[in-house]
Image (cartoon, rainbow, N blue to C red):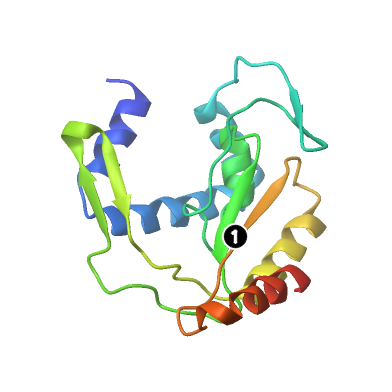
């Protein structure tokens, strides 16, 4: 059995949200040291794609990770070291919020799919902005970062643009 298959089976064996949290936690651990980052690079392998340009940005290849995985910008460097050419964080909201009640992630193995109805849980824009400044200051960041903007659940829809603007300005 390959390392990939072992990791895949491990993560598919438990509660989806607990496994997600464990993955983020492990990435944070590995990204915190040079040895850990090297191990992530080895585990991620070398992408077999040419660099590309889009939206005025250069990407080392077309595979990145979308918003929803690293909601609170905790594992950006770990994801980079695994080989993703960009990371989109979030969804980031102005204020912290818990998201929807549990359960809120469901697996459908026969369809090889997952449904996420987490409801934008997160630490809020101030924590995320601080983490982004720290990542940038570390000198380790080599990939573009995207931010998925969201409104807080308690923000009325007519005022959603104010939430989006607040997150952008932060």
Q: Is residue 30 left or right of residue 144?
A: left
Where is residue 147 shown, x and y percent of the image? 64, 57
Where is residue 26 shown, x and y percent of the image? 45, 51
Could you say which is closer to the camera, residue 31 or residue 47?
Answer: 47
Circle 1 residues within 10 Å: few <14, some 14–19, many ≥20? many
Q: Farthest residue to the front: give it.
A: 158
Where is residue 165 shown, x and y percent of the image? 71, 73
- The vertical placement of 129 against 59, above or below, is below
- What residue sits right under mark 1 in the picture? 73
Residue at image position (65%, 71%) is 164
- The vertical placement of 36 against 71, above or below, is above
In terms of secondary structure, where does tag 1 sit?
Answer: loop
Could you say which is closer to the camera, residue 55 or residue 141?
Answer: 55
| Residue 38, quarter of picture | top right
Could you say which is closer to the camera, residue 73 or residue 51?
Answer: 51
Q: Farthest residue to the left: give it.
A: 110
Residue at image position (63%, 77%) is 163
Work out which quarter of the rendered image holds the N terminus and state it: top left
- The vertical placement of 93 against 29, above or below, is below
Q: Is residue 68 left or right of residue 140?
A: left
- The vertical placement of 89 against 133, above or below, is above
Residue at image position (81%, 50%) is 139
Residue at image position (38%, 58%) is 21
Work out which quarter of the rendered image holds the C terminus and state it: bottom right
Q: Is residue 89 left or right of residue 135?
A: left
Where is residue 92 shown, x and y percent of the image? 58, 67
């Amino acid at each position: 059995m390959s390392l990939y298959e072992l990791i895949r089976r491990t993560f598919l064996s438990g509660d989806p949200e607990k496994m997600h949290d464990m993955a983020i936690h492990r990435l944070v651990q590995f990204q915190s040291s040079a040895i850990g980052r090297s191990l992530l690079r080895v585990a991620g392998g070398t992408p077999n794609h040419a660099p590309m340009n889009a939206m005025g940005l250069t990407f080392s290849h077309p595979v990145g990770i979308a918003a929803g995985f690293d909601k609170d910008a905790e594992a950006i460097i770990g994801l980079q070291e695994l080989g993703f050419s960009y990371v989109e964080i979030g969804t980031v909201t102005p204020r912290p919020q818990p998201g929807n009640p549990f359960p809120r992630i469901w697996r459908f193995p026969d369809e090889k799919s997952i449904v996420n109805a987490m409801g934008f849980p997160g630490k809020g824009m101030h924590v995320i902005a601080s983490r982004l400044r720290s990542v940038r200051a570390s000198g380790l960041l080599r990939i573009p970062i995207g931010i998925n903007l969201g409104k807080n659940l308690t923000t009325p829809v007519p005022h959603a643009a104010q939430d989006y603007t607040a997150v952008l300005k932060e």
